[in-house]
Image (cartoon, rainbow, N blue to C red):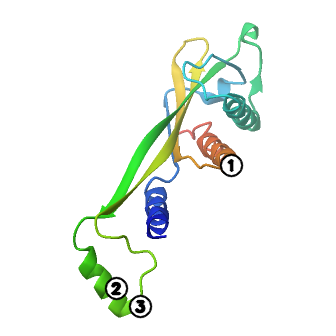
């Protein structure tokens, strides 16, 4: 019981500190109004399994909302789109080697018996998966990258939650496309 409660507290703290982050950068000297069409380049680091199609579909949806039309690469698109994705594992450990006895005693005196306090010398480890998504827009005529969106988020064990997170980060990325003129 102690370990599962401590695990939950660790995961809540970790989730709060590693919330979804989205960053966009772009070439300020580019006139983004000239881009009307796009095609896809092959990813060097695609998402695994069905996630690859999901990433492409979410990006296609956002580009279409921004007024861009998807065309075949042979049709001479204005932009080329490529994404790269990855997952990093991160281990989180927490526990108590000393000082727990006094802290537990003080807690019990103030609030009553414990239900979550770890035993002295007990440690809990959890593995957290952090997903990364990088989307690049490349000017097809000059082959220069003109826009990049980077997103990181902690992944869930639940597919539906991860689908929602993916959709949200892609929406947040393309909220900043096309960039506002200075």
Q: Secondary structure at mark 2?
A: helix
SS at badge 3: loop
Q: Earlier in the sequence, mark 1 or mark 2?
A: 2
Examine the rendered structure and indicate whether residue 134 appears above or below residue 169.
Answer: above
Above-or-below relation of 57 to 93: above
Q: Position of residue 69 (x, y in %)?
A: 77, 25
Q: Label 1, label 3: how many angstroms apart (C-alpha)?
A: 40 Å
Residue 85 place in picture, x, y as percent: 55, 30
Q: Which residue is mark 2?
A: 107
Q: Is residue 182 visible?
A: no
Q: Which mark is residue 36?
A: none
The numbered mark, 2 or 3, whose residue comes first in the sequence reads: 2
| Disc 1 element | helix
Q: Residue furthest left?
A: 98
Residue 112, which numbered label?
3
Instruction: Kindly identify the residue that appears in the image at 74 percent across and 29 percent down.
Output: 68
Nearer-the-camera pick, 104 or 18: 104
Label 1, on which residue?
164
Image check: 154 left or right of 49?
A: left
Q: How many marks?
A: 3
- Tell me the distance, in whole angstroms, between the alpha carbons under discs 1 and 2: 39 Å
């Amino acid at each position: 019981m102690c370990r599962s409660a401590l695990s939950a507290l660790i995961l809540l703290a970790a989730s709060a500190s590693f919330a979804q982050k989205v960053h966009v950068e772009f070439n300020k000297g580019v006139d983004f109004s000239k881009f009307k069409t796009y095609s896809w380049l092959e990813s060097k680091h695609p998402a695994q399994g069905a996630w690859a199609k999901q990433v492409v579909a979410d990006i296609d949806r956002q580009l279409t909302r921004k007024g861009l039309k998807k065309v075949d690469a042979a049709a001479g698109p204005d932009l080329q789109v490529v994404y790269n994705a990855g997952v990093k594992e991160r281990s989180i450990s927490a526990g108590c080697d000393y000082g727990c006895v006094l802290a537990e005693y003080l807690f019990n005196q103030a609030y009553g018996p414990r239900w979550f306090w770890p035993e002295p010398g007990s440690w809990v480890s959890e593995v957290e998966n952090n997903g990364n998504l990088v989307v690049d827009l490349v000017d097809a005529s000059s082959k220069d990258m003109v826009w990049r969106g980077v997103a990181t988020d902690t992944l869930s064990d639940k597919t539906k939650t991860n689908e929602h997170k993916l959709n949200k980060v892609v929406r947040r990325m393309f909220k900043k496309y096309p960039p506002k003129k200075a």
